[in-house]
């Protein structure tokens, strides 16, 4: 997809759905087998703006949703967990889709997709995981002692009613968002003002700081190793090979299962970071469509 083509992308239609009294923003485009696109931490359905048109034109009914606490969805003061979002996705499917769907997710959205397919196989037709996160947060045993102490102190600061808002206000500044993107994207041309604004705007909403604090201090949730044995549907795993947040070596578990004959296809994408769908849509969209055509 060229820069000129991206410039002509039609803005996403914004629809609302009420879940447990909270407004949830979503979009839908196209007809055919339903796909549910799930963003990662700090992102929103707009992060799929380069993929939705291509997937819809390919013959699919494409849904993208802002998880509760993110994007244009409400940001109530709750204990945010992966289980909470998985329940939301299942209810969204029950009310809006009602036929087996392919769940597509990046980062935390990838782990959520895996959870839905593992725990609710009746609503799924498969999953596409892009640089799937290993958890909502690090598990204590994954960190050495100095890092555990640092993270323990950081948790207290984030939760602090005095210091927490100051820290959040510092982290959410546009120049810091851009610097973070420069660390995790390998295609710097994809880091546009539009992308920075899209990530910044929701942080200005009432309740955003408390959502941030809740998520950063939430339990990590299930591991990929716990979920995969429960998955009965085909899975496509796409991985930006140069991701500093979820290094490609973390994808070894998917490669091993592929080698054991399980219906898991793994593709590493060179010179690409944490968000392949946004960095390399010209590569990712054809890979997804080719795999989907085989279902």
Image (cartoon, helix red, strand yellow):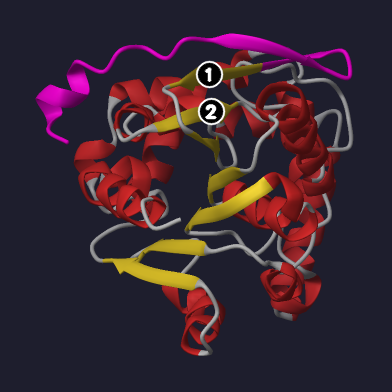
Instruction: Tell me: residue 67, above or below residue 230.
Output: above
The magenta stretch is 1-24
**Residue wearing tag 1:** 27
Residue located at (50% from left, 74% from top) = 251
Q: Is residue 35 above or below residue 248?
A: above
- Give neighbour class at mark 1: few <14, some 14-19, many 20+ (Cα, 10 Å): some
Q: Secondary structure at mark 2?
A: strand
Which of the 4 image quarters holds residue 212?
top right
Tell which of 84 and 153 is nearer to you: 84
Image coords of residue 119 (percent x, y): 79, 57
Which image quarter: residue 208?
top right
Expressed as whole percent of the image width and height from the top left, the position of residue 238 reads 40, 61
Instruction: Looking at the image, tell me whether mark 2 or mark 1 is earlier in sequence order.
Output: 1
The residue drawn where x is 30% and y is 12% is 10
**Residue 139 image position (x, y, % from top left):** 77, 68
Number of marks: 2
Toward which corner of the image does residue 18 lie, by quadrant?
top right
Query: Residue sitting at 20 percent across and 44 percent down?
Result: 282
Q: Which residue is mark 2?
A: 63
Left or right, 122 with respect to 72, comes to right
Residue 49 rendering spot, x and y as whole percentages: 37, 27
Q: Which residue is most to the bottom?
A: 260
Q: Residues within 10 Å of mark 2 (few under 14, many from 20)?
A: many
Mark-to-mark CA distance, 2 and 1: 6 Å
Q: Is residue 57 magenta?
A: no
Q: Is residue 24 visible?
A: yes
Q: Kindly check if marks 2 and 1 are in contact, taking CB atoms under 8 A apart as contact.
A: yes
* Nearer to us in this view, 189 or 1: 1
């Amino acid at each position: 997809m060229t820069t000129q083509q991206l410039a002509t992308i039609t803005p996403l239609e914004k629809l609302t759905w009420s879940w447990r009294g909270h407004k949830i923003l979503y979009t839908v485009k196209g007809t055919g087998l339903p796909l549910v696109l799930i963003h990662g931490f700090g992102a929103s359905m707009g992060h799929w703006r380069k993929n939705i048109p291509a997937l819809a034109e390919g013959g699919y009914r494409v849904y993208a949703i802002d998880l509760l606490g993110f994007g244009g969805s409400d940001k109530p003061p709750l204990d945010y967990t992966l289980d909470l979002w998985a329940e939301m996705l299942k209810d969204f499917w029950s009310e809006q889709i009602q036929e087996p769907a392919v769940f597509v997710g990046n980062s935390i959205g990838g782990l959520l997709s895996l959870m839905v397919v593992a725990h609710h196989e009746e609503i799924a037709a498969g999953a596409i995981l892009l640089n799937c996160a290993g958890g909502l947060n690090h598990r204590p045993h994954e960190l050495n002692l100095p890092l555990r102490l640092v993270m323990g102190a950081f948790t207290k600061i984030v939760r602090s009613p005095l210091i927490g808002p100051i820290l959040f206000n510092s982290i959410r500044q546009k120049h810091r968002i851009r610097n973070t993107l420069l660390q995790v994207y390998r295609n710097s041309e994809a880091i546009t003002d539009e992308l920075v604004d899209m990530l910044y705007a929701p942080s200005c909403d009432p309740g955003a700081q408390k959502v941030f604090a809740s998520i950063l201090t939430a339990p990590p949730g299930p591991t990929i190793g716990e979920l995969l044995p429960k998955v009965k549907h085909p899975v496509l795993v796409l991985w930006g090979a140069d991701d500093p947040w979820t290094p490609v070596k973390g994808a070894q578990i998917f490669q091993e299962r592929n080698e054991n004959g399980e219906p898991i296809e793994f593709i590493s994408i060179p010179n690409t970071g944490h968000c392949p769908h946004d960095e390399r849509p010209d590569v990712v969209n054809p890979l997804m469509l080719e795999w989907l055509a085989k279902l």
